[in-house]
Image (cartoon, rainbow, N blue to C red):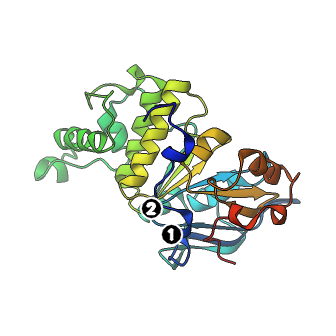
């Protein structure tokens, strides 16, 4: 994708209106989380639909992190419910979320630099050798891991990494991010959550990661993108969820709403009801 391509040519060809009336893949209803006298989530809602990139934006203290932690199993809400494919689920731990098909790429990446790329992709899911070598001696099936790692990297068009046996510590920041994204895409068969994926990257590496997120979506995994970078959000998001004071205040259509208005809604300088009707993206369940 050419960095000079106009924004309207780089967003999804699928209109946000296509999500209206469809069953969300992932839904949060009325999530509440309190820490003593501090309320991090005050009845937060969210819907993620098949085939979309949903951006979540909000000022510091808006509850974005708590919302994502609830969806990824890192915290248990005090009230509310989470539904996956329309069915209530209890995501008490990150492992439970992973088992349900929800993968998260954290801002800290959570890769092991001293291990190779293939091992990082299968971290915690390492396949064992067939027969006695695996069942008795617990030997890892490294040839399979490297072959499948190469397949996953190729499926996402990650051409800058040629050797799955290469140590992650030898990779650039963008390549490490690509490894983390590839791991999430490989196992996140329901949802992939990405927390500030371009925060520590330069312009060129950010461009590659944005292209990677689009490929993850196009390969069939809906994506929740948390980002403070408004140009990135408006370039690739299908809908924009605005979080403020612990709850959702608006879901915007990035094709019909300006970045200035989105920031104004996010900070409370603009009431969402003051925006024209077409600026509001459909699909929010009331």
Q: In this view, does 168 lie above or below 7?
A: above
Q: Is mark 2 on a helix, strand or loop?
A: loop
x%, y% of residue 51? 45, 61
Which mark identifies residue 29?
A: none
Q: In which quarter of the image is residue 152?
A: top left
Q: In this view, does 93 lie above or below 205?
A: below
Q: Which residue is drawn at 10% across and 53% down?
A: 131
- Extreme residue in the left direction: 131
Label 2, on which residue? Answer: 51
In this view, the residue in front, 119 or 138, is 119
Label 1, on which residue? Answer: 18
Q: Which residue is drawn at 22% across and 38% down?
A: 146
Q: Can residue 136 be seen in this view?
A: no
Check contact, mark 1 vs mark 2: CB within 8 A: yes
x%, y% of residue 10? 49, 44
Q: In this view, does 91 lie to the left or right of 150?
A: right
Q: Is mark 1 on a helix, strand or loop?
A: helix
Q: Quadrant of residue 79?
A: bottom right
């Amino acid at each position: 994708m050419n960095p000079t391509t106009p924004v309207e040519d780089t967003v999804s060809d699928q209109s946000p209106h296509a999500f209206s009336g469809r069953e969300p893949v992932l839904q949060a209803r009325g999530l509440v989380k309190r820490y003593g006298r501090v309320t991090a989530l005050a009845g937060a809602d969210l819907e993620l639909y098949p085939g979309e990139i949903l951006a979540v934006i909000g000022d510091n203290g808006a509850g974005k992190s708590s919302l994502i932690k609830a969806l990824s199993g890192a915290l248990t809400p005090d009230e509310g419910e989470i539904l996956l494919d329309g069915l209530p689920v209890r995501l008490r731990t990150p492992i439970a979320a992973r088992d349900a098909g929800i993968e998260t790429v954290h801002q800290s990446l959570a890769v092991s630099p001293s291990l190779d790329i293939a091992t990082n992709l299968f971290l915690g899911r390492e396949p064992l050798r067939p027969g006695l070598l695996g069942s008795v001696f617990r030997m890892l099936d490294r040839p399979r891991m490297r072959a499948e790692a190469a397949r996953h990297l190729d499926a996402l068009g990650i051409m800058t990494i040629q050797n799955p046996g290469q140590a992650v510590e030898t990779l650039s920041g963008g390549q490490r991010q690509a490894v983390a994204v590839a791991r999430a895409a490989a196992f996140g068969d329901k949802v992939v959550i990405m927390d500030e994926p371009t925060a520590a990257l330069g312009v060129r590496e950010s461009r590659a990661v944005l292209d990677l997120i689009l490929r993850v979506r196009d390969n069939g995994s809906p994506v929740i993108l948390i980002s403070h970078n408004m140009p990135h959000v408006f370039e690739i998001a299908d809908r924009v969820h605005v979080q403020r004071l612990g709850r959702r205040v608006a879901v915007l259509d990035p094709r019909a709403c300006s970045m200035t208005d989105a920031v104004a809604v996010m900070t409370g300088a603009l009431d969402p009801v003051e925006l024209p009707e077409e600026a509001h993206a459909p699909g929010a369940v009331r």
